[in-house]
Amino acid sequence: MLTKKIAGILELHIDMTAQEIVPMLEQPPHPEMGDVAFPCFLLAKSLRKSPADIATELAASIQESEVTAEAAGPYVNFFFQRSTAAEAIFAQLSHPDFGKLTIGEGKKVVIDMSSPNIAKPFGIGHLRSTVIGAALYRMYEIAGYSVENVNHLGDWGTQFGKQIAAYKRWGDDEKLAKEPIKESLNLYVKFHDEEEHDQTLGQEAREWFRKLEQGDEEATRLWNYFVKISMQEFERMYKRLGVDFDHVLGESFYIDRTEGMVTKLQESGLLIESDEALVVPLEEEGLPPCLIIKQDGTTIYPTRDLATAYYRREVMGADEILYVVGAEQKLHFQQVIAVLRKLGEPWAEDCIHVPFGLMKFEGRKMSTRRGKVIFLEEVLDEAVQRAREIIDSKNPNLPNAEEVAEQVGIGAIVFGDLKNHRLNEINFSLKEALSFEGETGPYVQYTYARIQSLLTKAAENVPGGNTRSFISLDKISISDAAWNLLKHLSRYPDYLEKAVCLKEPSILARYVIDTAQLFNRFYHHERILDGEPQELEYKLLLAQVSGERIHQILTLLGVETPERM
Ligand code: ARG
């Protein structure tokens, strides 16, 4: 809003349209330097003057009642007349459509996210995919897209032959029922240990997978059993993270379609034989060949992803497909997308891998190799327990401490993930993520709760109670702290748009940290509950809109907002 206003003024003085000016406008590095800055470098060439001379002349020629212009070197810095601008910002913030975008209207996006593997632990990579995917889901929705997500479970492949073979030899239903994933994993590890000196095991596993592919009754029943017990465990995690799926369609769902996929590739003349396997060569693309059929005649991960892409495009009607999957699968997606391109599908360009970096927990890597597994549920439990300890020491009388501890503990993990640029590697420290003072989820949640208690107190003591209706700001002098907060709030739509376009929830996480910090500065600087009624009203309104913004962003990110903590 502020930049538009400045662009509108500048347009009258220079040979550029407001639309061209808006993206050039900057935010001065320090608020005391001005509210908006216009750099004059680009004009130097056409005007044949130095940027500093242009800035001086331009500043002198701008005579506006609501804005002052000052030259500072090659920049013109603009200062708003605060109370007038604040009125406009408040009006903008209370519009029901504020914080919604229309860039996605008429477009459907399908988000492939979470996608853990059956009978394997839910890894940290899956956690990141779930958390980032769920944030993107909500961000795309608020940007006007129609969004559907798919949990693309890893529920097919030769490893299920091994799983069944191991189960047939050593399976213990009681243990499996108690700790399904741990016990499945034990069986899998045992299989690999024993396989080294028992040749027949590998044979058995291949036999079981063949049976499974042919729909054998027992193999199918056992496979279903593994899917069921794994899903029960995953669903517990999804519930705690507040994540739902529109579709749970594992790799097995596409088996029927892989045959057609192979035919299509064959007919396009893309498939060649190599070492008894069938591949699509991708030399021209500078990539290794994409494996389609293995030596043993079975299909493989990329084959299923190709069939899946067609399904999403043709049956689900996706205009865009996002794959929220770790950066280590970069090559896989490059290959799949390159094959789609070779098949002449223009929509290959709308299949987008949204990668993210590795996350370690307190320096430890999560892996399924023996002995080194950290189970996600244990991490969640530990975060909640530590949150509980902090809450008990800070606010021992909090009535719903257990519920709040869950919100704060999980929130710390989700926020601790999302505040990082998604491609960065993260060394996650629970202690840091749970701190109420740092740039953390609990810090932002705490600020939100502070605002709510302030508003509740105001409702008790102040006429007008809980309903803030906006009044004129005429005679009010707006402090730097309040003004900086207000300006920041007015910039929200730009941040949201950038976050959606870059598929980067961290932009919103950073924005909400700044919001909380600016609010706290305002809170410490002013006695919010004191002052003339008109002034009080405006300060409470500012607190209220700050709270609304924090609430909206935390919700987008998947972090809950307790009213008290
Ligand atoms: N299940 C896979 C894994 O854990 C992730 C699947 C990602 N999605 C996809 N369409 N390939 O590595």
Image: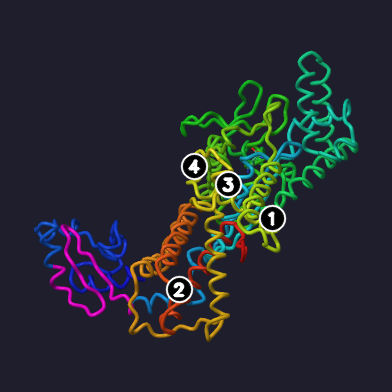
Label located before the other in sequence (2 or 3): 3
Looking at the rendered structure, which numbered label has been put on residue 245?
1
Label 4 and label 3: CA atoms lie apart by: 14 Å
Label 4 and label 2: CA atoms lie apart by: 41 Å
Label located before the other in sequence (4 or 2): 4
* Location of ligand 1 given as a quarter of the image: top right
Marks 3/1 in contact by CB < 8 Å: the verdict is no
Q: Nearer the viewer, mark 1 or mark 4?
A: 4
Looking at the rendered structure, which numbered label has been put on residue 323?
3
Residue at the image position 79 percent from the left and 47 percent from the top: 232
Looking at the rendered structure, which numbered label has been put on residue 423?
4
Label located before the other in sequence (2 or 1): 1
Label located before the other in sequence (4 or 3): 3
Label located before the other in sequence (3 or 1): 1
Where residue 502 sits: x, y (%)?
46, 52
Where residue 393 sits: x, y (%)?
63, 53
Q: Nearer the viewer, mark 2 or mark 1?
A: 2
